Each structure stands twice: as C-alpha cells, then as structure tokens.
Image (spheres, helix red, strand yellow):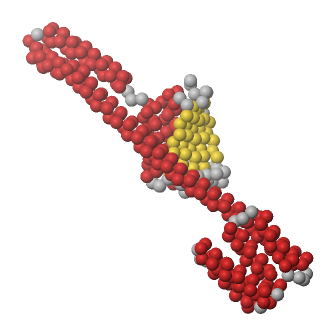
C-alpha cells in the first residue's frame, strides 16, 4: 500500500515539472488511480483522493471556501468520520495557508520585482537625460565663450588696430622731424601719447563690456567636473536651486575650490559609485553640499585639503561641516549678500 501511495505521489509530482496542459493529464490520471485504490482497498486511500482534489483546486485557483468541500468525503465511507474529517480539515488548512499567504507573498514579491525593474529603468532614463542635459549645457556654454572671444578679437582689431597704426605713422614722422623741427615733433609726440591713452581707455571699456558672466563660467566648470567623474565610472549629478546670480565672484571661487577638493577626495578614497553636488540659494544663505555613497570615515583628520577648505570658508564668514554616517558629505554655508 505504501509503495502504491509513493507511486501515486511520484506520478503526480512529474506533472509539476511539465506544462499546465500536461499537468492536468497527470493530475487526473493520479486522481483516477487514487479513486480506484480507495474502492479496492478501503478508506485508507481517501486522504490520497483529498490530496489530489486539493491539487486540482490549487491549479484552478478557486476561492478558499472550496477547500472545505472534501470534508464531506468521509461521510461516503463508513468508519471514524470525526477523525477523518479532522485530518482532512488539517490538510485544508495547509492548502488555505499556502494559497492565502504564501501565494500572496509570491505575487507581492513578483509585483515588487516588476516595480523595482521599472524604477531602475526610470533611473537609467533619468541619468541619460541628466547626462545629455549636462553635455548640452556644456556645449552651449563653450559655444558662447567662443562667440564672445571671436567678438572680442574683432572688436579689438577694429577699434585698436586703427589707433595703433596711426600712432606708428606719427612716430615715424616724429623720427624725421625731431632734429629739423623739435617743437613740432614735441607736439606730435604728445598727440601720440594722448591717442594711445585713448586707446587704452577703449581697451578697458571693451574688456569690461565683454567680460564673461562669472555664473556661466562657474557652472561650466561644475558641469565639466561632473562629466569627468561620469567618464571615470562614478555617476555624478549636479542640482541647483534659487537665484545663483547673488553668488559673488569670491564665493564662486571658494565653492569651486572646495568642490574640486571634495570630489577629488571622493574619487581617491571613498570607493563610491555616486556623487551629488547641490547648490541652494536661500534668503540670507548659500548652501553647497557634496556627498558620496562611499565607505565614509570614523574620524576626520584635518590635512592640507580640509584645512584649506576651512580657511577659505572662514575668510568668507561661512561655516563648514561634515557628515560621515552614510558615505561622506561636505556642507558649506556662506552668507548671501542679497
């Protein structure tokens, strides 16, 4: 009898390894064998029939109430109905637990996996968009700088070229007149001096007018820093918030120097895969933070790099702080002059 039971269970288990269509064939065949054995050898095989009925219900994915249906089977065969019903009820509880809890968590896990994959795809798309935006911004800034250089060169040529050429011609004439007519040569010399002074004033005016915007230059340097880190395999993002035009040239120098120092340390020592650079301009404060997801550190030692950061920040009336619990974060707070 035990060999037959083992044969039935093994016969059914084969069905678990095949497709749903073949699984039905194996399940129904095993169920038929179980019914035949129960008819031939008695109620000892009723539990085998119950087992296969529950497997069929599990395949059909019916409501849990259907699992109470096999409890009526012991009534068909005379004997210890109460004991048999308790055993069938126990089996029913096992299947109900499986369907209501284990299957639920399996489906939940599958949904979570799909959601995670979707989030990963969204993050990858977002990273590509950010990278393309950085490249686009850097390209625009570079083109703007080239255009400004070209305009500056043309302006200097047009404004200053004629001035210098005229001065050269007058100096040549002065060289010829300096002995023959000293007074006239002296007057021409003063005219050349005045002309050159006027040219210098024009140069200063042109340079003041054509001076590149400091904000754009600073942002270009940060974008270039992010691009370099991305090319080296460390994903680096830059976020800005608020009116960056209130940041002075001196503050930009401090922010850039400290940012380059912090990113360099992260690349060398942190063993990180991600770096975030954030600049937030608030009402009376400017906050800049550089954070990575690396190993962090238990103790901060003021070497030349960190000492230099502290010195620059203090000179500007700001504060410098660090967070080392999760990775490493450098926070710079500077007063806003707005």
Q: Position of residue 337 (x, y in %)?
A: 56, 25
At 18% from the left edge and 19% from the top edge, which residue is drawn? 167
**Left or right: residue 209 compared with residue 91:** left
Q: Evaluate whether residue 270 shows in this view.
A: no
Q: Quadrant of residue 311?
A: top right
Q: Residue at x 84, y 73 (%)?
A: 72
- Is residue 230 in view? yes
Q: Considering only vertical position in the picture, is 61 above or below 287? A: below
- Of residue 259 and residue 44, the one placed in the foreground of this image is 44
Quarter of the image where the C terminus is located: top right
Q: Name the residue rendered at 72%, 70% in the picture.
A: 57
Locate residue 58 relative to residue 206 in the image: left or right. right
Q: Is residue 326 left or right of residue 191?
A: right
State the residue at coordinates (28%, 31%). Answer: 150
**Percent coordinates x, y for residue 239 in the rendering:** 53, 40
**Residue 221: percent from the left, percent from the top?**
44, 40
Image: 333 above or below 199: below
Q: Would you identify the image quadrant in which residue 162 lies?
A: top left
314, above or below 165, in the image: below
Which quadrant is home to the N terminus? Answer: bottom right
Q: Residue 153: x and y, percent? A: 27, 29
Given the current orientation, which residue lies at the most extreme top position? 183
Q: How many numbered circles are shown?
A: 0
């Amino acid at each position: 009898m035990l060999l037959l039971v083992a044969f039935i269970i093994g016969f059914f288990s084969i069905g678990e390894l095949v497709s749903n269509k073949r699984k039905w064939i194996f399940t129904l065949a095993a169920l038929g064998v179980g019914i035949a054995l129960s008819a031939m050898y008695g109620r000892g095989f009723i539990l085998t029939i119950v087992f296969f009925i529950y497997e069929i219900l599990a395949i059909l994915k019916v409501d849990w109430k259907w699992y109470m249906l096999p409890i009526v089977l012991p009534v068909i065969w005379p004997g210890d109905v109460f004991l048999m019903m308790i055993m069938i009820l126990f089996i029913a509880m096992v299947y109900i637990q499986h369907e209501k809890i284990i299957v639920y968590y399996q489906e939940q896990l599958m949904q979570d996996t799909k959601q995670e994959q979707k989030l990963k795809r969204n993050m990858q798309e977002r990273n590509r968009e950010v990278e393309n935006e950085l490249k686009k911004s850097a390209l625009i800034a570079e083109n703007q700088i080239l255009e400004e250089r070209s305009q500056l060169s043309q302006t200097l040529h047009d404004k200053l070229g004629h001035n210098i050429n005229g001065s050269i011609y007058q100096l040549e004439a002065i060289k010829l007149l300096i002995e023959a007519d000293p007074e006239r040569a002296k007057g021409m010399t003063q005219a050349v001096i005045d002309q050159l002074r006027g040219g210098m004033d024009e140069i200063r005016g042109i340079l003041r007018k054509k001076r590149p915007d400091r904000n754009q230059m600073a942002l270009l340097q940060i974008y270039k820093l992010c691009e370099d880190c991305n090319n080296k395999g460390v994903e680096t993002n830059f976020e800005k918030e608020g009116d960056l035009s209130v940041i002075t040239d001196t503050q930009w120098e401090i922010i850039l120097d400290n940012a380059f120092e912090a990113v360099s340390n992260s690349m060398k020592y942190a063993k990180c895969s991600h770096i975030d650079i954030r600049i937030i301009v608030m009402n009376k404060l400017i906050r800049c933070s550089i954070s990575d997801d690396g190993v962090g550190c238990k103790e901060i030692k003021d070497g030349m790099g960190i000492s230099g950061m502290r010195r620059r920040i203090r000179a500007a009336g700001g504060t410098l702080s660090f967070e080392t619990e999760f990775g490493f974060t450098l926070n710079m707070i500077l007063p806003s002059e707005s």
